Image (cartoon, rainbow, N blue to C red):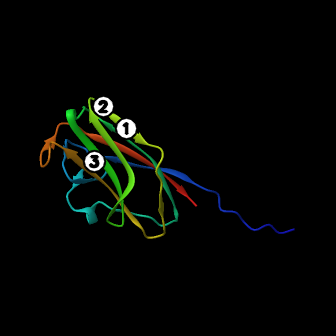
Amino acid sequence: MNHPSVKPSTVETIRWNSGSNLSDNTFQLYGKQDTVEEQSQLIFLEKGTLSNLTVKLTSEPGIGNSRKFTVRLNGVDTSLDVIIADNATSGSNNIDQVQVNELDCISLVHTSTNNEGLILPSVGISGLKFKQI
């Protein structure tokens, strides 16, 4: 009896590390940041789901300040984001998911409140799960 082959589902982790103090309105790479999104995008060769965005900072934003990390899909913000405020140094979004198709591009953008345009004394380390479907 012949059985159709079943492609197993794969889960991978995508990682970013700013590599230096975070700048406002920058796209994250591994080991650096860039102000040009196209130079920071990751391309997908398989259809899948992005989830579980987790971010850790080396120092807190400070009272009244926050940092936001947003996954962008093909140049557009998604609901998969993490906001870290006040004295917190980490955050996660385990609720929202983003569907990606073959040849879609994603990026991770960092923005801040009350610090616009400044270089912020913290390194951002981020991770995101990709499940191939």
For label 1, the residue is: 91
Q: Is 109 placed left or right of 13 in the picture?
A: left
Name the element at disc 2: loop
Q: Residue at x 23, y 52 (%)?
A: 33
Which is more N-terminal, label 1 or label 3? 3
Vertical arrangement, residue 58 with respect to residue 93, above or below: above
Q: Amino acid at mark 1?
A: Gly
Expressed as whole percent of the image width and height from the top left, the position of residue 91 reads 37, 38
Mark nearest the camera among 3 and 1 is: 1
Q: Residue at x 70, y 63 (%)?
A: 6
Q: Quadrant of the N terminus?
A: bottom right
Q: Amino acid at mark 2?
A: Ala
Mark nearest the camera among 3 and 2 is: 2
Q: Give me the C-alpha separation between circle 3 and circle 2.
A: 23 Å
Vertical arrangement, residue 94 with respect to residue 43, above or below: above
Expressed as whole percent of the image width and height from the top left, the position of residue 75 reads 32, 65
Q: Give the number of the disc on residue 88.
A: 2
Expressed as whole percent of the image width and height from the top left, the position of residue 127 reads 40, 45
Name the element at disc 1: strand
Q: Residue at the front extreme? A: 64
For label 3, the residue is: 31
Expressed as whole percent of the image width and height from the top left, the position of residue 89 reads 31, 32
Q: Amino acid at mark 3?
A: Gly
Q: Using the rendered view, name the quadrant where residue 123 is placed.
A: top left
Name the element at disc 3: loop
Q: Are marks 1 and 2 in contact (CB under 8 Å)?
A: yes
Q: Quadrant of the C terminus?
A: bottom right
Mark 2: give few (<14), some (14-19) or many (20+) Cα within 10 Å: some
